[in-house]
Image (tube, rainbow, N blue to C red):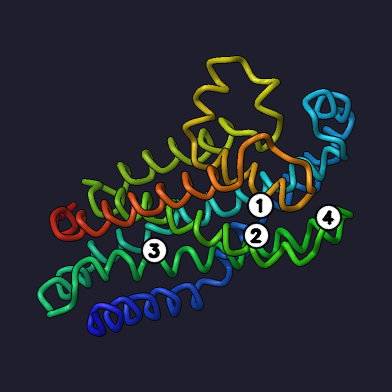
Amino acid sequence: MRSFVADTYAIFWREMMRYRKSKSGVLIRLIQPAVWIVVIGHTFSGTKPLIQAAGFDGEYIEFMAPGVIVLTAIFTSIFGGVNTLWDRRYGFMNKALVSPIFRSSLALGKMLAIAIVATLQASLIIAISLIIGVSFVDYAMIIPIMAIITLFSLGFSGVSVIVAATAKSQEAFWGIINFLGMPLFMISPALFPLELMPDWLASLAQINPATYTILLIREMMTGVESGIPISLSLGILGAFVGVTILIAGWTFTKDVTRPF
């Protein structure tokens, strides 16, 4: 057990050092969510009657802020697997796999690093939200919100690492990731309530883990109940993360050595 933890930490620290050297990329990934929350939040401010009709008694920018926070986590974590592509291409992965390191620790270490970076970027979006006037019903909720974002990001980093480990080419990786990223955000209550969606779209949103994360964070930020028990949202989020960790660990024992 101690060896597994040490191996995981070593991979985690290596990945964090890589992010430290790519500060420009981290800042660039903040531009889109910052534009969303500032521009879109004020552009659609006139839709307040619509969200009020769906049971949300507040400003539209307060409604969408949790969605943009989750958007930041989605895109940071789902693109984070690109480092695994470089490790496969330039030989680090083969060297790691012939060492006595636990293979599953490779996946978990990478996932933890991606999740931490995603959480840090989401915290900057929370700061921007506060600057432009988004209020919290209880500012002590920021800490558990950050914990939920970390858990959520861990799940999506697992998806990214799995795709990166199994992709037969860089083009295949980017194609799958771009196919997953924005649809998962749009098929959720990030911008509008589920009640305003067509039935078929709302049904799809109900199997999207981002939906439960957004509803949970929105309830914690605004105090407006989502109608879904917090225990159910946490249970679904925990199950999602657990499944991705297991699949990612198994994948690194099987597919990661395949060349492009």
In three-dimensional space, the C-alpha distance between marks 4 and 2, rounded to whole angstroms, equals 13 Å
Residue at x 89%, y 29% (from the top left corner): 46
**Residue 119 is drawn in which quadrant?**
bottom right
Residue 75: percent from left, percent from top: 53, 50
**Residue of label 4:** 137
Looking at the rendered structure, the secondary structure element under dot 2 is: helix
Q: Which of marks 3 and 4 is nearer the N terminus?
A: 3
Tag 3: Cα neighbours inside 10 Å, few (<14), some, or many (≥20)? many
Labels 1 & 2 near each other (Cβ < 8 A): yes
| Direction from residue 235 to residue 98 in the image, left or right | left
Q: Which of marks 1 and 2 is in front?
A: 2
Percent coordinates x, y for residue 174 in the rendering: 38, 45
- Which residue is under mark 3? 111
**Looking at the rendered structure, which numbered label has been put on residue 69?**
1
Other-residue count near label 1 (Cα within 10 Å), few / some / many at <14 / 14–19 / ≥20: many
What amino acid is at disc 4?
A: Val
The tag earlier along the polypeptide, 2 or 3, is: 3
Of callouts 1 and 3, the N-terminal one: 1
Which badge, 4 or 2, is on the more N-terminal residue? 4
Q: Where is residue 167 in the image (x, y as percent from the top left)?
A: 25, 47
Front in this rendered view, residue 153 or 128: 153
- Please report contact status of discs 4 and 1: CB closer than 8 Å, yes or no: no
The residue pinned by badge 2 equals 145
**Nearer-N-terminus badge (4/1):** 1
Three-letter amino acid code at the position of disc 1: Ile
| Secondary structure found at label 4 | loop
Q: Does 20 sit above or below residue 86?
A: below
In this picture, residue 13 sits left or right of residue 231: left
Quadrant showing the N terminus: bottom left
Q: Earlier in the sequence, mark 1 or mark 2?
A: 1
